[in-house]
Image: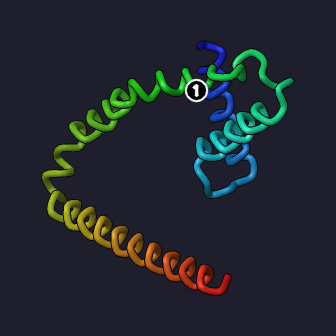
Amino acid sequence: MIASFSLILLCQLGGEILVRALGVPVPGPVVGFVALLILLLARDRWSMLALGPLQPGAVEGASRSLLGHLSLLFVPAGVGVIQKLDLIAAHGVAIFVVLALSVVITLLVTVGTFLIVGRLFAASGDQS
């Protein structure tokens, strides 16, 4: 389990190093987890890679354990909100308006994307 946690963290660290070295505007953990996905897909394709932390089910078990404690990751964010209560009190209405508008815009863009993709799939299905 510790080796699998280490592999997950090493992939995240590798992604962070790669992003900072190349100056790519993508979060490092995203690149790291894409690398982990590639490793897991390679492990499933070539059995010689299924060693140590890449044994079948090892990374999956470690990630399941992490997901079981995901709520702990919200504690630092909650502490940050409490530390900035004066800022929230001063600009609370503006923060609420921005959050509400961003949610509405995100929902509209998601619906629009869904409709466009649905029409494209329907059009490609009619032609075949």
Write down the quadrant of residue 109 in the picture.
bottom left
Task: Name above or below for residue 121 compared with residue 5.
Answer: below
Q: Is residue 69 left or right of residue 116?
A: left
Q: In x, y percent, where is residue 79? A: 27, 33
Q: How is the image coloured?
A: rainbow
Which residue appears at 30% of the width and 65% of the height?
103
Which residue appears at 27% of the width and 62% of the height?
99
Task: Name above or below for residue 34 compared with residue 51.
Answer: below
Q: In x, y percent, where is residue 95? A: 23, 60
Q: Is residue 7 left or right of residue 121?
A: right
Task: Name above or below for residue 114 compared with residue 85.
Answer: below
The residue type indicated by label 1 comes to Glu
Q: In x, y percent, where is residue 75? A: 31, 30
Task: Name above or below for residue 59 compared with residue 105.
Answer: above
Mark 1 burial class by Cα count in 10 Å: few <14, some 14-19, many 20+: some
Q: Quadrant of the C terminus?
A: bottom right
The number of discs equals: 1
Choose between 64 and 122: the one closer to the eye: 122
Which residue appears at 27% of the width and 70% of the height?
101
Choose between 118 and 24: the one closer to the eye: 118
Q: Mark 1 — residue?
A: 60
Q: Is residue 48 left or right of residue 93?
A: right
Which residue appears at 75% of the width and 52% of the height?
22
Q: Is residue 125 visible?
A: yes
Mark 1 secondary-structure assignment = helix
Q: Is residue 16 visible?
A: no
Q: In x, y percent, where is residue 24? A: 68, 56
Q: Quadrant of the N terminus?
A: top right
Write down the quadrant of residue 115 in the picture.
bottom left
